[in-house]
Amino acid sequence: MNFTLHVTDGRARAATLELAHGSIPTPIFMPVGTQASVKALDHTDLLEHIDAPIILGNTYHLYLRPGDENIAKLGGLHGFTKFPRNFLTDSGGFQAFSLNTNTKHSEEGIIFKSHIDGSKHLFTPEKVLEIEYNLNSDIMMVLDDLVGLPAPRERIKESIERTTRWAERSLLFHQAQKEQGKALTNHLFAIVQGGTDVEFREISSKALVGLGEFDGFAIGGLAVGEPNEEMYATLEYTTPWLPKHKPRYLMGVGTPEDIIEAIDRGVDMFDCVMPTRNARNGTLFTHFGKLSIKSPRYKLDENPIDSECDCYTCKHHSRAYLNHLYRSGEFSYFRLASIHNLRYYLNLVRGAREAILSRTWAEYRRQFYAKRGADEA
Amino acid sequence: MNFTLHVTDGRARAATLELAHGSIPTPIFMPVGTQASVKALDHTDLLEHIDAPIILGNTYHLYLRPGDENIAKLGGLHGFTKFPRNFLTDSGGFQAFSLNTNTKHSEEGIIFKSHIDGSKHLFTPEKVLEIEYNLNSDIMMVLDDLVGLPAPRERIKESIERTTRWAERSLLFHQAQKEQGKALTNHLFAIVQGGTDVEFREISSKALVGLGEFDGFAIGGLAVGEPNEEMYATLEYTTPWLPKHKPRYLMGVGTPEDIIEAIDRGVDMFDCVMPTRNARNGTLFTHFGKLSIKSPRYKLDENPIDSECDCYTCKHHSRAYLNHLYRSGEFSYFRLASIHNLRYYLNLVRGAREAILSRTWAEYRRQFYAKRGADEA
């Protein structure tokens, strides 16, 4: 893996990450395709309408259905979905948190109870990598021990210590594979934990960086219930502990504002279900703020969702038609709205990159806020 | 409106229908877009992936939501949906049947109770045309009095007599518009009723043809519960009563077999929710019969749905991926499956037309059946 840092403007970074399935200009937003499908879209939409260089898949979900070994037989995630660019796979650590009534942690790993049929499955750091090899992920996340916030200090301490031990097991297992000439294009990212605690984030970062050759570092355990300002502060004091010449990925974040603030604090990569989930719920992002397309005010509105957007949906369809499709429960709405919201997110980070490269990041960030007035665009 | 009959091979016909939004080669299948959207697709899908020259919209549904006057303000159905080709609109007669607990017939018209908010609305033959003018339909169906089968003879008799009186009112109303230079590109089709009764179909056909200048004739009141063979027999003795140089449209039909048999009996136009509804339920049509994509047998099947299909979905995606998307409840499945099934239907009628033009219709029909083995392709 090759990571070239081109420009740092303030703390904002523009870089290029080279992976087996194409290069990734950063900052980058990665659409989420939990079940090997970015909801309502297919690979052509992602290539032509979104132009996404990398998307996510989920280890836990794909292990259960259709099964990682089946995906391996079908050519890995690339062959299965026909999306020819890069995949990053989450490890299941987040599902252990989000589905927590059905999970049990031990030093060995996490026991999941399937949300599909109730069967039990043990995810160890090593097992997770075996699944990710089968998926042929370009970026594999290690299994981590995530804690919802607020949480007792003792539980957060346990989380970072276990996350470090699991990261070490992952690294050893992966290095053994590579020594056998296997998994050479499957890159491994560690995950920093520690809640919103300055000291814990420092300990976690140093411990993981100290383990040696991870290909990148994620910041996990944020956007799990804490106020925004605490998340921004946590990024502020965490990114300085991470290596300058490795990519930094903030997991599961967030609103356009969150992404701008995280880029400003030195983060390179993002993923979130927000653009696709909000699209399905009727909330569309624009340069001027959010709008709720189901509102009767759009019933006769012939304008596109966002007058400054170049997406397929804005080029072809009116707010009036989208309002009608939403209210009528038509499936076509979900695709058209998801195309718009994802394009908005990808354009946001593309614009950020251009600004950083031309050393006008502060102005880009200022303009971003200046345009946003009332939430209804 | 121009209707040119090119070739009659047996009783099968190949013709061209010229309308304001493009010419329609017949036999033709028309995808159903009840709420101004062919479910899960948009206009680009219909143009590029299906290549449909005409689709349906529904007068009753669009009158209620978003309102025909609103659609008129937004440029009619063409401006609203951005589908630039032709629209045919059903009159509400079928909804009076399919939603019959909420309707009440009188000589004046049909009172509907809205399925959305329970409000009451009177649809007269004249009111229906006013709605269809607002929608700017290229082909407008008259309001008819449809009867489910089996039904008492007396009720069927009442249905054809009322349908004739309503057709006459429609024709007078429409001619008055045209004399004022209005609605010149909105063409009017009458609907033959009469159940599966030879005598009633003859009476209904002759009465409607006798009224004068309808632009085409539909055969309604079939595929409403009667056995297939009775439907075929009814077509057999109804089409001879219809004018040779006007298009003949069999409403709401049907399976690929039904379409082949109806073409064989002189029908030119078809519509049905079957390709899109079956797609959503997991039933996909192929040259070799139907298949149920949710079956575990397709879990590792890297073949396309139909090895002889040229659709977008068959070009890009495997049965294995579609099986996974269906089982995972992913929205993208609905679009990919609908593209395939509609393309299959359009290719079926395109092939029929070519065969008729080259006077090999009997061979085409024979081949159609020869390929179909067991239902699981």
Image (tube, coloured by chain):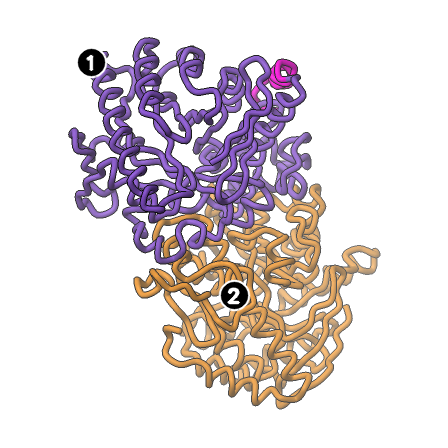
Chain colours: A orange, B purple
Which quadrant holds the C terminus of chain A?
A: bottom left
Q: Are marks 1 and 2 in contact (CB under 8 Å)?
A: no
The answer to whether one can see residue A41 in this image is: yes
Is residue B171 rendered to the left or right of residue B313? left
> In the displayed structure, would residue A205 be above or below residue B259?
below
Which quadrant holds the N terminus of chain A?
A: bottom right
Q: Residues within 10 Å of mark 2 (few under 14, many from 20)?
A: some
Is residue A211 rendered to the left or right of residue A264? right
Work out whether residue B309 or residue A193 is closer to the camera in this orientation and state it.
B309
Is residue A320 rendered to the left or right of residue A91? left
Residue A12 lies in magenta, yes or no? Answer: no
Highlighted magenta segment, given as a residue range? B361-377
Q: Magenta span: helix, strand or loop, mainly? A: helix
Which quadrant of the figure has residue B206? top left
Kind of residue sitting beneath label 2:
Cys
Q: Residues within 10 Å of mark 1 (few under 14, many from 20)?
A: few
x and y, in percent, of residue A265 in the image: 57, 84
Residue tagged 1 = B154
The answer to whether one can see residue B328 in this image is: no
The total number of labels drawn is 2
Work out whether residue B166 or residue B295 is closer to the camera in this orientation and state it.
B166
> In the displayed structure, would residue B137 be above or below residue A46?
above
x and y, in percent, of residue B166 in the image: 25, 29
x and y, in percent, of residue B76 in the image: 39, 51
- Residue drawn at x 50%, y 46% is B41
Residue B366 lies in magenta, yes or no? Answer: yes
Kind of residue sitting beneath label 1:
Glu
In the drawing, what numbered circle is on residue A272?
A: 2
> In the displayed structure, would residue A7 be above or below residue A130?
below
- Residue drawn at x 53%, y 42% is B22
Judging from the image, what secondary structure is the residue with disc 2 in?
Answer: loop
CA gap, disc 1 to disc 2?
Answer: 64 Å
